[in-house]
Amino acid sequence: MTIRPHTSVALVVFGLIILAAFWGLAYAWWHFRVGLPKEPLPLWRRILATIGLAAVSAQAILFFLPWTRIGRDPILFGKWANWVDPTFLVGVLCVLAGKGRSRWWLLSSSILLFMISYLLMLTP
């Protein structure tokens, strides 16, 4: 099996995008545990930011599901694809209610995970 140079470059870029998305999600979780209690946010913003973090985490879980049994079953894959859009929309709208640098990392993670999941939907 020979790996062509353009294939290996594409795999490296794909891996870096995935790594950046999950690093942003990990940073947001860390900031949620450490920094959020210190920030004086109104209750409604804190609730929306928590919902946004949960939605982006759900996107991360949805990202891995096509490599399970769901990816081999067209009906389950279609149901999986129906969950990608709502988690993205809820995640983006709720993340914008947050505050600080973690908001932008979480927003970029949500966008990257959505783009990769959308590309996965096009593969079958």
Image (spheres, grey):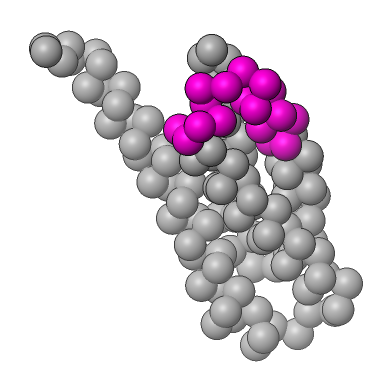
Residue 107 in percent (x, y) is at 63, 50
Q: Is residue 91 magenta?
A: no
Main SS of residues in magenta = helix
Can you say whether 20 is above or below 122 in the image?
below
x and y, in percent, of residue 26 in the image: 48, 62
Looking at the picture, tell me which residue is in the foreground, 23 or 77.
77
Quarter of the figure that contains the N terminus = top left
x, y percent for residue 54: 68, 60
Question: Against 15, is 102 above or below?
Answer: below
Residue 39 can be seen, yes or no: yes
Q: What is the span of residues highlighted in magenta in the rendered image?
A: 67-84
Quarter that holds the C terminus: top right
Task: Where is residue 73? Give x, y as percent.
Answer: 57, 22
In the visual, does 91 lie left or right of 107?
right
Q: Judge from the rendering whether residue 6 lies leftward or rightward of residue 94; answer left or right.
A: left
| Image height of 75 relative to 60, above or below | above
- Going 57% across and 15% down the picture, which residue do you hit? 122
| Residue 108 appears in the figure | no
